[in-house]
Every structure is written in C-alpha cells, then in structure tokens.
Amino acid sequence: MATPATIYQSIVEELLRFKSISTDPAYQGEMKATAKWLVELFRQHGFQARMVENYGNPIVVASYLVDKAAPTALIYGHYDVQPAVLEEGWDSDPFTLTKRGDRLYGRGVIDNKGQVGVHIASVFALIASGNLTQNVTFMIEGDEETGSSLLGTFVREQSTLLKADYVVVSDGEISGGQPVIERGYRGSFNATLTIKTSTTDLHSGMYGGAVPSASQEMISLLNQLVAPDGSIRIPSWIDDVPTIDPQALADHARLPFSEEEFQRITGVKQRFSSNGLDFCSQTTLQPSIVVTGVQSGYVGVGYRNSVPATAQAKINFRLAPGQDPQRLLQTLQVYLSDLLPSYVDWTLETDEPSAGIEISLDEPVIQEAQAILTTIYGQEPLRKFVGGTIPIVSDYAQVLKVPQVLIPLANEDCAMHAANENFQLDHLERGLAFSEAFFSR
C-alpha cells in the first residue's frame, strides 16, 4: 500500500509541472488545465469533484463522505503560483520538482501546491487504508496570488458546497523549527497611482525648470505617505488600530528571533520598529504602507534628457486586524486629493480590500490539533499572528462561521515567492504525520 510520502511525491511532481501563474493572462490555459487535472485526480480517489467557474479562475471543490454522522473538514488551498524563470537565480527548472540535499525545490512546492498536497496525500492514504474518520471537502482556488477578489462572492453564493464543521488552512511557515498555530492575519489591498503633468515628455533643455516633472511630483507625494523608517504619515490612518492584546505580545515573545539570522536571510542593515515592538508584533499587528514599484521617465542605456510626463507607483497596504478597509480607502482618496497640486492629473486604482482577522484558539478542534503537533514535534506549538493576508479566512469567518485551524507546515527559509522555493524534507515528513493523525483521530 502506498504511503503518504510516496503519494505526495507523485501528486506534487505532476502538479508542479503546470505553469499556473495567475498574475499573467498568458497562462490562462495552464490555469484551466491545472483545475481539470485536480478534478480528475480527486475523482480517481472516490471524491465527488467539480470545477466551479465564473468566479475568476476555476475553483476545484471535491468532497468525500465517510459517514453522515462524522464531522466534516473543509481544507483550503490554492493552485496558482508566482511567476518563475530560471534566469531569476533558480538552480534548477522551477516547474520541475527537484530534490537537492535535504530539500525539494520548485515553484509552488510551498506556496501552495506542496502544502495543500500534504493534506491531499494523507487523506488519499487514509482512504486507502480505511482509517479516514472525517468527511473531507477540498476547496482549491486559482486566484490567491492576485487577491482572490471574487472569492468572497463565491463563498456567499456557494456556501452549501462548503458546509463543514471546521476549516483547515496550511499556507505559511513555522518558526525556528517549532510548530505554529496561527492566530490571524493582517488585511490588505493594493493600489496603482498614476499621475500626469503634461501631454508628452518635454525637452529638458527647452522646458526644464519651467514645467512640472511627473517623476518629481511622484517622489514628493510618496514621501508624504510613508517616512523612511516605515512610519505612516497619513493623518488618522492608525486611529482604529486596536490596542495590542498582552497575550499576543507574550506569545510573540516566545518566538525564536535572531538579529544575526534576520540579517543573513534579508541582507538589510537596519530593522525598524514602532513603539519598541518585537519584530513579529510590528509586522503582524501594525499597519504598513510599502511602495512596491515606481516607473517614470527613461532608465535605459545612456541618457534621454526629457521631463517625464507620467509616473506610476504600485503601493501595498497592510492593515492591522480590526481596521476598516473601506474607511482607509476613503481616507487615502481624500489625502491624495488634498496633497496633489491642481496641475497634476491623477487616477487611483485599487483591488478588492481584505480585512484582517483574529482567530479564537479556544475551540476544541484547535486544541486537538495542538495536542497532535505537540506529540509529533515533541514541543508545544507557538502561537502567532501573521503579517501576510489570506482573504479567504475572513470570508469563511463571515459566512461559514465555523472554527478555523491555521497550521503552517513550511520551513522558515523556504524562499516563498523567490528563486529556489523549497520544502525541507524533515518538515514535510512532520507535516504528513500531523495531517494523517489529524484526519484519523
């Protein structure tokens, strides 16, 4: 009989071959092919599976009934991945699962094909051995990397497909080799700000000093959004940030953190902190504004001496759990309107905002998960908030109103979203052991 590890290898090896890059429309065919492959995979193992469309990229919903009287687990994952090309620094083909040393490498091996693949493999193995004790529904979507803007609508309109007693999400990293139960996430939204100061680029000798430069106007504006140390300059932006729960600070104080390791991983020379907060609390319980890209003028070989007519900035906003995304969107619009001079034309485009969330850890199913993690890792799991955003967790909380078990399985140095994304084999083995024990309890 195949083990969870061998099942995992065969599933993830095939799944990683699909270039399911949701951020690039050129890969729409790959997205649909991935969803079709998943549907067929689940059907081969006795699931009722379907591909739901009209909510962005296809969503795969697959259910297996053990016993009507048994509890039902809804397992979330996403099959879309970040772009990857060999020239970005990969040591092997990013879309070929590759073993080197004590790790598996490939785009999606962590985020998220490999992590949801852990639960798929363990459930398949339990079905084969007759030891699955929970009814299981998998929901695997293809828009997480682009914000899943229609997923909330899907959950509301198709909630009967997702009926469950609890939710399981594995889409993150452990801390310092220790198991983790996640307490919640920050909210987020992205914005594209475009400004225009003239109808065309203008000769800098003939017009320089007499006309506005879109580049300089953008630089001036961005400096009014966020200070060099990361602090936010928009008035009232932090007015609705909740007071930090002392238990959260205590939990975060238990997290292993090394300045030397932080600098080794990041390469940065300075770490910022507001109000003396520890690193985890700063990046999970406080809002942030990050300019993720700026484009204006000419930056090619040599020089083109002209005054830029347009400039564009991409900006990522992270929200503390409890902040109101709609209030912040309105605040941003008013602030930009007040700051930008009348001679600057501008537009602001944003994606669908997602609110942050805090999860109660007092639920019995979470206590059971904690006990299993303790047995497998030999130590109690750490509890922490996460600075990233998984919008579906908020959607589940608002619509399904059931407990959510948020158990990351990836090693801390997994290079998520970067070259050489990897899954350390001993963490993979522990993840499979946890999943098998959890769904057979």
Image (tube, helix red, strand yellow):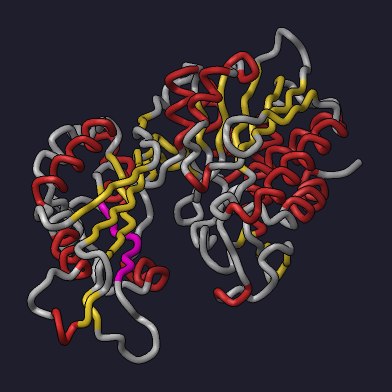
Q: Residue at x 14, y 40 (%)?
A: 334
Q: Residue furthest bottom?
A: 302
Return the x and y of residue 416 as percentages of the image width and height: 52, 58
Q: Main secondary structure of the magenta part?
A: strand
Please state if 283 lies on the left or on the right of 59 as rendered: left
Return the x and y of residue 188 as percentages of the image width and height: 35, 42
- Quick one: 438 or 21, which is closer to the camera? 21
Q: Residue at x 13, y 35 (%)?
A: 239
Q: Residue at x 68, y 38 (%)?
A: 119
- Quick one: 22 or 308, which is closer to the camera? 308
Question: Can residue 109 be seen in the rendering of this structure?
Answer: no
Magenta-colored span: 289-296
> In which image quadrant can residue 221 be found?
bottom left
Quarter of the image with the N terminus is: top right
- Quick one: 381 or 80, which is closer to the camera? 80
- Residue 72 belongs to magenta span: no
Return the x and y of residue 439 as percentages of the image width and height: 69, 28
Quarter of the image with the C terminus is: top right
Please state if 20 lies on the left or on the right of 143 as rendered: right
Q: Residue furthest top?
A: 69
> In which image quadrant can residue 18 be found?
bottom right
